[in-house]
Amino acid sequence: MDYSVIGSLADHDYSEAILDEAGRMQAYINVLKGAALVGRNAYQLNSEEVGNLMELVDEGHYDRPSGWASNLLCAVYKVCRPPATGAVELPKANRRRERERPANTAAEASFGAYPNPARTWVAFAYDRKDGEVNGSIVIRDLAGRTITTLMMNGQRGQQIRDPREVAPGTIGAVHERKRSAAHRAHHLTTMRALLWMLVALCAASIQSSTAYGQWNFQLDTTFRTIITSSTVNSLAVMPSGHLLLSGRMNFQGAPGERALAKVDMNGVRDPSFPFGYGGGKLTPWADRYYVDNGLVRRFLPSGLLDPSFMSQIYSPYVGSNVTLGDYHVFPDGRLLISGSYMLSDSVRGFVGQYRLVWFSNQGYLDTTRIHRRANGVIWDFAELPDGKFLCSCTCTQYEGQPVDRLFRIHADGALDTTFHSGVNWGNIFAYHGLPDGRVYVGGRYKRAVAPNDTLYLARFMPDGSLDPTFNHANNLGLKGF
């Protein structure tokens, strides 16, 4: 698809609002383009693509691209929002308004960190937008202790680091800058953005007894890929040291977009590796790998599909109209999958739409488990240290009982009624459970008891209340996890 006209708007003297809308149009087009390149249409988007459309809508805009996204989400995926003309759920007085920017005020800087959680590498990206080139990225732990300071070189760029050189847990990245001469009295001031990210434990790479005095700040120049666009969404390290990449990737000199790729320890792509299945989350299991590409598939180290595993739409009792949310792999290869599934197992009484479904390690519907219903899609969930699961959804009921958008279930899928988060709006993208039952939750969301307080990273107590010892006010300006 040619959107060169949209892309050329930045070369002309248009207002910031017009350029912002043009960028959002391009983001919408990119979602549909990415699906089309792997043979899917707008009615077959995966959970990541639906999430990208939800971000266009949840930003509070009622412009053309958000209208396109909203219409598609509501008509096909049953994720609807009130129209701009008002509704009981969203009166005009409560709609989000863009903050007025005084004349001659520079655009706000933006930054992020990815992937998040990080296991083997993390990139801190920044776009200053104010013309200044002096600044730094201060990395701190949860206690506020400075781990290291990275210098920003230029107005736009990124710093790539190895997270295995710090203890697993949660770290914060504060971007700081020196103000212009007119503001030198303020000396060094902190931008209104504090980014928190999770450093995940990778047992194959980190030993609990290992201690590091400092990070190695040098970029490994021996590693180079020739990826020209667009995204690497997930990666896995193979026993050989090779990397499996899943996403939407264009390689220099290779025609077409690839959803799956294999590169060696220097970043050189293996041209013989199949690339037809992939795009989403990769999960190693035994000597094989699960991957999300709208369905959960399993492939061999060679890249070929595992013939001993069938995808969900080919499993008896499962309909072909599937919406994948998230998946979890148990040690024996069984799967717990969220989303939307039409079941027809009349023998065991599972008939109709289910949102949380178990499958065997061969891909069959697990007839020994109780599949669970909800009145909305469970998009993401994560296993906690005690075997329970934390779930985020667009639902208000689970198994016939009222739930918040963030709720907890037992290992068998039954609702844990001792956890009440109060979250009633937003999107949740990252979880990190602690052994004492507390949990970090990252995203962009609100609670019913504080409708004007947007949270980006919070620590919840075992009962779902906010941890009073955690500084939740340090989330200003974070655009999402």
Image (cartoon, grey):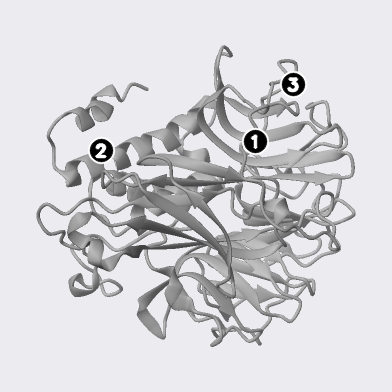
Q: Give, as a three-letter code, the residue at label 1.
A: Ser
| Residue beneath disc 1 | 246
Q: Is residue 112 visible?
A: yes
* Residue 458 x, y percent position in the rendering: 53, 74
Question: In the figure, residue 23 lies in which quadrant?
Answer: top left
Near-viewer residue (474 or 272)? 474
Question: In the figure, residue 168 lies in which quadrant?
Answer: bottom right
**Disc marking residue 273:** 3
Near-viewer residue (358 or 276)? 276
Looking at the rendered structure, the secondary structure element under dot 3 is loop
- Work out whether mark 3 precedes mark 1 in sequence or the reverse, and give the earlier one: 1
In the rendered image of this protein, does residue 448 appear above or below residue 17?
Answer: below
* Residue 43 x, y percent position in the rendering: 48, 40
Q: Give, as a three-letter code, the residue at label 3.
A: Phe
Looking at the rendered structure, the secondary structure element under dot 1 is strand
* Residue 238 x, y percent position in the rendering: 81, 36
The mark tally for this picture is 3
- Work out whether mark 2 precedes mark 1 in sequence or the reverse, and give the earlier one: 2
In the rendered image of this protein, does residue 299 appear above or below residue 349?
Answer: above
| Residue beneath disc 2 | 22
Which quadrant is the N terminus positioned in?
A: top left
Give the CA separation, mark 2 to mark 1.
28 Å
